[in-house]
Amino acid sequence: MTTLMVPRAPKWHVHAACRNADREVDWIDAEPGSGAAVDCQETCRLCPVRLACAITALTNGESYGVWGGMDQADLEALRHSDAQIAA
């Protein structure tokens, strides 16, 4: 018998500001600097779980979208600075 594992959302998701945000905004495909990214970042600005979201994105290697108020370019810059510190 095969067991299907369904990923569960982290507990912090229930407190995320984006949970009730406009569903027309595409969080995953928001290109850095685009109007969609700016809208997403504005929603993230006062989110109570912004840090947890950003940590999740960095931990999971998310490459696209807006996470914790950071777009793709921000996440990549953080990863790059982390690599420089470790070296």
Image (cartoon, helix red, strand yellow):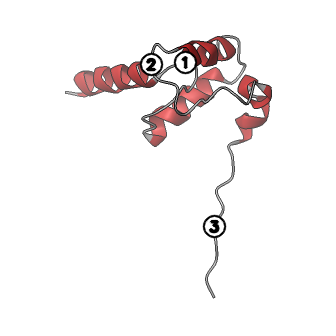
Within 10 angstroms of label 2, few (less than 14), some, or many (20 or more) residues?
some
Instruction: Report x, y in % for residue 82.
Output: 32, 24
What's the residue at 54%, 25% (across, down)?
66
Within 10 angstroms of label 1, few (less than 14), some, or many (20 or more) residues?
many
Q: Quadrant of the N terminus?
A: bottom right
Q: Which numbered circle lies on residue 76?
A: none
Secondary element under disc 1, as helix, strand or loop, is: helix
Mark 2: amino acid: Pro
Would residue 11 appear left or right of 2 to someone viewing this image? right
Instruction: Report x, y in % for residue 86.
Output: 25, 27
Mark 1: amino acid: Ala
The first of marks 1 and 2 along the sequence is: 2
Q: Which numbered circle lies on residue 5?
A: 3
**Are the residues flagged by discs 1 and 2 in contact, CB closer than 8 Å?**
yes
The first of marks 1 and 3 along the sequence is: 3
Residue hosting label 1: 37
Residue hosting label 2: 32
Mark 3: amino acid: Met
Instruction: Report x, y in % for residue 21.
Output: 76, 24
| Quarter occupied by residue 54 | top right
